[in-house]
Image: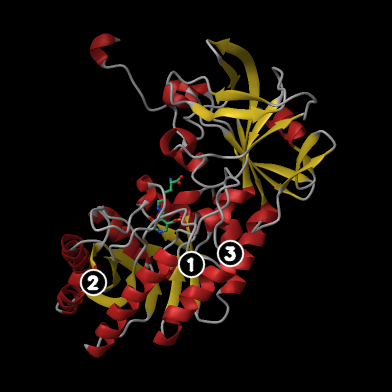
Amino acid sequence: MSFREVLTRREAALYLEQVAVADLAERFGTPLYVYSRGALIERVERLRRAFEGAPHLLAYSLKANMNLAIVRTFLDHGCGADVTSRGELERALRAGADPRMIVYSGVGKRADEIERALEVGIRMFNVESLEELITLDARAQALGKVAPISFRLNPDVDPETHPKIATGLRSSKFGIPIEDAAKAYAHAESLLNVRVAGVDCHIGSQMTSLGPLRDALLRIKNVVLALHAQGHRIELIDIGGGLGVEYSGHDDPPTPEAYAALALEVLGGLDATLVCEPGRVLTAGAGIFVTRALYRKQNADRKFLIVDGGMNDLLRPALYQAEMRIETDPLRAGDRAPVDIVGPVCETTDRFAEQRALPNVEPGDLVVIRDAGAYGFAMASGYNGRPLVAEVMVDGSRAELIRRRQTLEETWQGESIPEWDR
Ligand code: LLP
């Protein structure tokens, strides 16, 4: 176990820090996301300590969980931000981020998004195509600015993760092929309104072994050495995010210490600040998703447990067949029997677990999904007319709403019926 478990049992009841999950469900309703502030801090501090041996910037990747309270917690502990849209940029700024600690990644930055990032003066644009570079140069010129850039290099390495979250293969849309690096940097040098600041790569998410990352970083190192030889000053080396977490008994992710040690070992001697864009490793294990059991039934030879949370609230099991650990509250006696845990959404794929051996659950009991702090709420939608759920942060024995549940009226806010039909 890489981190201390945040969800504990006291007799039959579940607790997050000092607060009973049943009390949270009662007070804030279900479905509900709850995050432990202590766990967020433990994770970020541990990663920060692991990188202490070298100049570094932990740019929290907002895509994992962009709630302002979460972002603020990481900013308070020395992080910058990795953003991928204007929306994330504004959130980072709103949470109090120093623009000099923001990097901007993504294959499809629009001109208006680029302009805003130039205006506030971010640390680096991770450029993903030559056409993006040209747009960036033009927008910078129009604003009388110089854009600090890196190229996101695609090292053609298989991160050995779920194919839907692998990004470092030649066939993916991400980055530019690593063998085109010299040409790309030479092109950047020829432009007046961009300035070469670094190199960048991100090969995939939920990586549970370091081998692929080692391969990728060695390739990046060679590029940096070649760029040095051509007279480029590389002040930032961005290794992306991707460190995996333990979702089920089968995953055995590297520790933050081993991860940082690898980065320092391969890239430490290059006289650059290491940038890392952690998302999942900082938030996944700090969060839970709390649902309430509604009904039980049996169709043919399958038992189903229907809960009030659905794939629209937590998409990972439906989209990536993610196996996430599940707890029940109260813990009832009796044999464990395999059951499909499903939500109310009208899709067969709306299933949190298939044939999972769970203790007895009765309608009204809580069914809690662990490690839901990353890519949980962040990927939620209003599918099937379902309001976005509430989010709560717990700190010791305190619990505070950090996003209230959407009201039904808000779910159709902004829509209107055309005049001809009124
Ligand atoms: N940097 C870049 C450029 C990225 O594309 C990502 C994730 C990260 C950093 C953060 O990676 P992390 O440390 O969280 O692995 N929705 C999927 C994960 C998609 C990841 C997308 N990019 C899931 O639920 O598994």
Q: Is residue 282 visible?
A: yes
Label 1 amino acid? Asp
Q: Quadrant of residue 236?
A: bottom left
Q: Which of marks 2 and 1 is in front?
A: 1
Separation (CA) of disc 1 from disc 3:
28 Å
Q: Mark 3 sits on what residue?
A: 255
Q: Where is residue 205 in the image (x, y as percent from the top left)?
A: 43, 54
Question: Regarding mark 3 in the picture, which secondary structure is present there?
Answer: loop
Q: In this rendering, is residue 124 above or below 229?
A: above
Q: Counting residues from the N terminus, which is met first, the one under dot 1 or under dot 3?
A: 1
Label 3 CB, ligand 1: below 8 Å? no
Alpha-carbon span between mark 2 and mark 3: 44 Å
Residue 144 numbered mark, or none: 2
- Give x and y (percent) for residue 382: 44, 28
- Give the label, 1 or 3, closer to the camera: 3
Cα gap from disc 2 to disc 1, whole angstroms: 21 Å
Find disc 1 in the rendering and name its residue: 98
Q: Is residue 96 left or right of residue 219?
A: right
- Quarter in which the N terminus is drawn: bottom right
* Quadrant of the drawing holding the C terminus: top left
- Residue in view at x 57 percent, y 49 percent: 284
User: Secondary structure under badge 1?
Assistant: loop
